[in-house]
Image: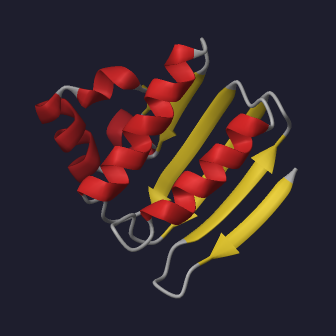
Amino acid sequence: MHETTATPSGLAITADGDTRDATVVACGNLDRGTAGQLEACLGRLRLLGCRRLVLDLGAVPCVDSAGLAVLLHAAKGARRHGDEVVLRRANRHLLRLLEITQLGLAFSIEPSIEQVA
């Protein structure tokens, strides 16, 4: 499976993988204007039976409350079915937001190279 989409508001999404594991790479702001696009992509992957979903957010500079809601909805849906959502390369602002709100517990989080160093 390979899918690439983009919105006029600037979010590009590429999804690669198979029906068990998929990686979604997002580029651009994840906000009220673009969150629906990511939500639709994640919904399609769930319908295909994806059990482990990796969201690469290394090129996402900003996540607002609508974007955070999409991420959380995906994590809750996955957990309900014994599946997993992994956040890869999330920026420090998103990680801090997840820490403050204690929503980070809903995800598996892979640190970026900068966070490891």
The residue drawn where x is 75% and y is 37% is 47
Q: Position of residue 32 (x, y in %)?
A: 33, 68
Q: Identify which residue, 11 or 74, lies in the foreground.
A: 74
| As drawn, 3 above or below 90 | below
Residue 50, located in which quarter of the rendered image?
A: top right
The residue drawn where x is 54% and y is 49% is 56
Q: Is residue 117 visible?
A: no
Q: How is the image coloured?
A: secondary structure
For residue 59, side relative to residue 69 (left or right): right
Residue 55, located in which quarter of the rendered image?
A: top right
Q: Identify which residue, 39 or 92, lies in the foreground.
A: 39
**Residue extending furthest left?**
100
Q: Position of residue 11 (x, y in %)?
A: 51, 73
Q: Position of residue 25 (x, y in %)?
A: 61, 56
| As drawn, 64 above or below 117 | below
Q: Position of residue 43 (x, y in %)?
A: 63, 45
**Residue extending furthest bottom?**
8
The residue drawn where x is 46% and y is 30% is 75
Quarter of the image for the C terminus: give it.
top left
Q: Is residue 100 visible?
A: yes
Q: Identify which residue, 33 or 112, lies in the foreground.
A: 33
**Residue extending furthest top?**
82
For residue 91, side relative to residue 108 (left or right): left
For residue 108, side relative to residue 46 (left or right): left
Q: Identify which residue, 99 or 77, lies in the foreground.
A: 77
The residue drawn where x is 61% and y is 18% is 83
| As drawn, 110 above or below 12 | above
